[in-house]
Image (cartoon, helix red, strand yellow):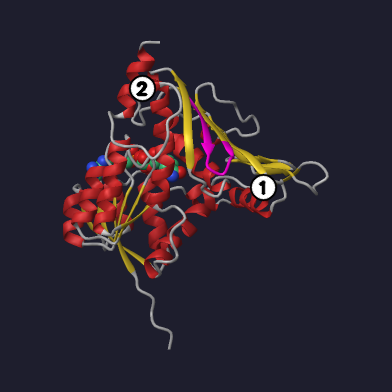
């Protein structure tokens, strides 16, 4: 007889668009059961509770975790709450914490998160679920097949601003470059208006990344980043890809993929659009796979996310200090404050 697979219990904190998308996807998978819900505001909490009436519901994440002791704590709050919620999950004894990008607002916070999770032996994943899109996967497949020759450049740009979009851009360009570590990063930025946003950011930022395998990364986002005219929906105006000695392959978040390869005889292309309904189920299934088997590490694991976050923070430090910044980064003044100060004087 095949032994029954464990069902993992899940508590979800922060029930906005992303929290509900996570809750619904966990609930649709028989490997998970929603046992707890928490949200500051009563309206969203009640709406979620109506969908999952068997779950314990509270306005307090701490209370929800204490009452339900879930295997998985998933939280989807705005970026200003990260470390305190990681602490809450660790304290509640969860096995895995699934949370949203950006993983932190500073290097110091990201390092504290990583240390806390490592010391407690708690797994973590950060929601880079775009990678499951068929167009994102197709580009990876073309690059990995060698059809564009030796990759020398990976690139990504988006019109959305840094704390929203740059973690995504760095993650997928790094994936297309087999996660070669960054040797150094040089950054430049402009504008302070978006520091007022709940995803505080310079209005525009660009980073040149030298990867250890010799590949150059070029990432830019915000006001002034190139448009992607093929895509109508503003948040999906992102283009990410690789150039090699014999061609290129790139994904448009809202507009499929295209490539020229050694054998393609012109441009080839195909469909694909960023779609939570398509991308979330495999992201969530990979959480069960990792909890079942420690060797099946989730592709969106927190240690990889930390390396990407460091590249973004290295770009911010470079704007302030000038010159090349070399990861791994040590604790320092919060990058956003230093960056805002530097850009305010320009
Ligand atoms: N991965 C992706 O593709 C993607 C897409 C969009 C947004 N995001 C990220 O998801 C996160 C959430 O985005 P959203 O649009 O769902 O946000 P939102 O503001 O709509 O919802 C967040 C919810 O969290 C609640 N909340 C905040 N702090 C809380 C706390 N301490 N305890 C209990 N409840 C709390 C708020 O009341 C709110 O209902 C952001 O970090 C954003 O960058 C990721």
Locate residue 184, reporting x and y percent: 47, 34
Residue 215 drawn in magenta:
yes
Residue 199, label in figure: none
Ligand 1 within 8 angstroms of badge 2 C-beta: no
Q: Is residue 142 above or below residue 9?
A: above
Could you tell me if the residues under marks 2 and 1 are in contact, i.e. CB atoms within 8 Å?
no
Q: Secondary structure at mark 1?
A: loop
Is residue 305 toward the left or the right of residue 77 in the image?
right
Label 2 sits on residue = 339
Q: Which residue is mark 1?
A: 271
Q: Is residue 197 above or below residue 111?
A: above
Foreground pick, 14 / 4: 4
Q: Quick check: 235 above or below 177?
A: above
Where residue 255 sits, quadrant-wise, is top right
Within-10-Å neighbours for mark 1: few <14, some 14–19, many 20+? some
| Residue 61 relative to residue 98: left or right | left
What is the distance, in whole Å, between disc 2 and disc 1 at their CAs?
Answer: 39 Å
The tag earlier along the polypeptide, 2 or 1, is 1
Residue 235 part of the magenta segment: no
Q: Residue 176, percent across and down?
A: 58, 46
Residue toward you, 152 or 170: 152
Q: Residues within 10 Å of mark 2 (few under 14, many from 20)?
A: many
Residue at image point 38% right, 50% down? 303
């Amino acid at each position: 007889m095949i032994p029954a697979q464990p069902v993992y219990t899940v508590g979800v904190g922060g029930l906005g668009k992303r929290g509900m998308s996570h809750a619904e996807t966990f609930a649709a998978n028989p490997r998970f059961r929603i046992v707890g819900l928490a949200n500051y505001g009563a309206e969203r909490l009640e709406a979620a509770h109506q969908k999952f009436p068997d779950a314990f519901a509270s306005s307090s994440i701490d209370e929800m975790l204490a009452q339900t002791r879930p295997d998985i704590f998933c939280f989807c709050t705005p970026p200003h709450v990260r470390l305190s919620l990681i602490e809450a999950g660790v304290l509640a004894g969860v096995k895995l914490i699934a949370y949203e990008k950006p993983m932190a607002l500073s290097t110091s916070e990201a390092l504290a998160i990583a240390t806390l999770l490592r010391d407690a032996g708690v797994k973590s994943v950060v929601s880079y679920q775009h990678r499951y899109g068929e167009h994102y996967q197709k580009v990876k497949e073309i690059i990995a097949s060698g059809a564009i020759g030796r990759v020398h450049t990976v690139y990504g740009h988006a019109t959305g601003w840094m704390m929203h979009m740059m973690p995504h851009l760095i993650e997928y360009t790094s994936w297309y470059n087999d996660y070669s570590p960054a040797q150094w990063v040089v950054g430049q930025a402009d504008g302070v208006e978006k520091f007022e946003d709940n995803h505080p950011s310079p209005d525009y930022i660009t980073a040149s990344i030298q990867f250890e395998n010799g590949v150059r990364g070029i990432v830019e986002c915000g006001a002034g980043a190139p448009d992607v005219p093929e895509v109508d929906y503003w948040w999906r105006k992102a283009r990410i890809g690789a150039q090699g000695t014999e061609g290129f392959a790139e994904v448009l978040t809202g507009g499929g993929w295209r490539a020229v390869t050694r054998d393609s005889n012109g441009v080839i292309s195909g469909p694909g659009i960023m779609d939570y309904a398509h991308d979330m189920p495999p992201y969530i299934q990979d959480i069960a796979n990792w909890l079942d088997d420690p060797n099946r590490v989730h592709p969106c694991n927190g240690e990889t996310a930390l390396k990407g976050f460091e590249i973004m923070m290295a770009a911010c430090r470079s704007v302030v200090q000038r010159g090349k910044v070399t990861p791994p980064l040590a604790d320092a003044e919060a990058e956003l404050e230093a960056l805002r100060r530097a850009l305010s004087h320009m």
